[in-house]
Amino acid sequence: MSKFIFLIPLLPFVGFLINGLGRNFLSKTLIGIIGSGVLVASFVLSLLAFSQVSEPGFTVQVINLFDFIKVAGLNIPFAFQIDQLSSLFLLIITGIGSLIHIYSIAYMHEETPAHFARYFAYLNLFVFSMLLLVMGANFIVMFIGWEGVGLCSYLLIGYWFGNNSYNNAAKKAFIMNRIGDLGFLLAIFWMLSQFGSITYAEVFAKASTAPVTVLTGITILLFIGAMGKSAQIPLYTWLPDAMAGPTPVSALIHAATMVTAGIYMIARSNVLYTLAPTAQHLVAIVGIATALLAATIALKQNDIKKILAYSTVSQLGLMFMALGVGAYTGGVFHVMTHAFFKALLFLGAGSVIHAMHHEQDIMKMGGLRKKLPITHITFLIGCLAIAGLPPFSGFFSKDEILAAAHDMHPIYYALGVITSLMTAFYMFRLYFLTFSGTFRGTEAQAEHLHESPFSMTFPLIILALFSIAGGWVGIPAVFAENAHKLSAFLLPVLPERHQHHHFSHSMELMMMGAVVLLIVVMILIAAKKFASVKSSEEKQLSGLGKFLANKWYVDEFYDLLVVKPVSQLAAFLSKVVDQKIIDGLVNGVGRGVQFSARQLRWLQSGQTGSYVLIMTVSIILFFIFQLLWKA
């Protein structure tokens, strides 16, 4: 395995170099082939690695490439670790990433060759960084990839840099991620101090001997890092604004890569979190609170991409709740299924936006199912999957999370069910307003409505198939014993969840059926309310509706509490401290030298009498000084 494993991240990096350096002379066709081809090649190698990991008797493979940091008493290698967890994430990242790259060839066709190459170079670099993150054998390599995806998200969100609001969204994402990254970095320093190492194997082996308070501090700091990258309260507001980037970028960030980094980090560090129950409870509480908050906001949004963005925040909250209640496999399972249906939904939204000439307001759509048949049916499959209806993939992963939540505490379960019901409602509100009823756009849009080209619909079809069948690797025991193949596969890395309560199969089926029935009811309510909307005008919102439409005014609160005070402080430092004091001091020294020089130049008058007088006075002063000094 070590013979080819380094090629998995290297190939996207090579694609980044070729497209980035050759952007001024490569053709768009060649750029697309290179950008997508390196990802497909990485996916093939990831499949090969996955097949080897799946073989009986496989042991964790650590490939040391070189010594990254080697000083007295400290050796941090640049090493990759291939095991069940990393191999699964490799498949998700390279598989979904390949489809998004192929989709982008048609979606971004209007760009000039230079910008087209810049786009694919950023995408390749993004995937390279994410692969480093999941392949690292220690927290430093993970952190390098962690920072890399943060940089690339800034570049991709602000890809259309001519629009200043997009630049502001990119800066917002970058800054909020840096806040979380500080927590991650402090956790690394603390681990170095406590364990003398940051290699996974050594840290986890020594964890049981560390004080619980130390482990709690380290895991909370790690979770702060995850809050930023995976958009949890209070560091979630950057993610909806990240919709400023091209739609395929939204799919890449929100589905398979960046936002799942926090989930991967906590799942990888499960040994530490299991030994720190306080931090684990904090993860669960923040997760379910984020899931509920984002779901309520999504109920009243009209921008198709913003709805999906808040949906992502909500689903990430459910994943964190799963990790917090000890269902590590359930959280990773939902990462996988979510990658399928959320990438499908974002790319489907991109197909709609492409057909609507960049219109994103769902109130100005409607009746698109006839004009966009492939986009319509695949988008419907994505909605059914995220709603959690059987036999779609989201049903199996959500059921596992809800079962684990109920096992921990009924309140977690109840809040998880409420989140799922809201998810079903707002997703089918989106579906019906977009594809049902009569068309509410302009005549010019109606004349040009057409299905997207094959390079865009092909990824939709593949993702739709995985959204249907992707959950069958995690069939619960209530349906068939030993049918949860994913749990068995991940068992060497992720511990089996300890169940505090055992339900009979009949009780579990009853609870499962009740949730599915409630989801169907929410879909029917959404159909009755939104399937026949004829006007693009929405009635004036007030009260709670206005509150939710304005996203709980969290952005305004942050502006008032953080942005405006910092801006005012910056203005004071610029105008007073910098310009008046610092510049005044520096300029004052310069003006003082100039003034002194102008006065001293009168000593050089060119008159002999003046020189004799100065010499005489100087000698007299010298003698006086000598007499006084001796006295």
Image (spheres, grey):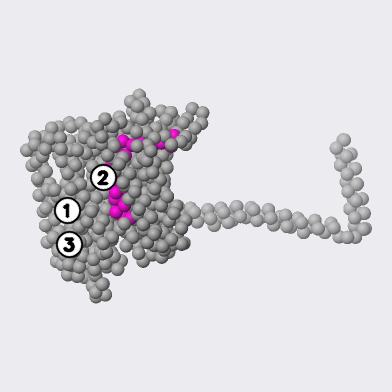
- Quarter of the picture containing the C terminus is top right
Query: Where on the picture, by quarter, is residue 268?
Result: top left
Q: Secondary structure of the magenta portion, mostly?
A: helix
Q: Residues within 10 Å of mark 3 (few under 14, many from 20)?
A: many
Instruction: Say which element carries label 3.
Output: helix
Q: Residues within 10 Å of mark 2 (few under 14, many from 20)?
A: many
Farthest residue to the top: give it. 209
Residue 143, given in percent of the width and then of the height, sits at 41, 41
Q: Is residue 254 magenta?
A: no
Sequence order check, earlier mark of 2 and 1:
2
Sequence order check, earlier mark of 3 and 2:
2
Of labels 1 and 3, the one closer to you? 1
Please name the residue shown 64% across and 52% down the image: 585
Where 440 falls versus 627 (above or below)?
Answer: below
The residue at which mark 2 appears reads as 335
Q: Nearer the viewer, residue 78 or 606?
A: 78
The residue at which mark 3 appears reads as 432
- The region drawn magenta spans 77-101
Please name the residue shown 8% across and 36% down the image: 505
Label 2 sits on what residue type?
Val
Query: Disc 3 and disc 2: Cα gap in Å?
Result: 26 Å
The residue at which mark 1 appears reads as 384
Q: Residues within 10 Å of mark 1 (few under 14, many from 20)?
A: many
Label 3 sits on what residue type?
Phe
Instruction: State left or right for residue 466 relative to residue 605.
Output: left
Query: Disc 1 and disc 3: Cα gap in Å?
Result: 13 Å
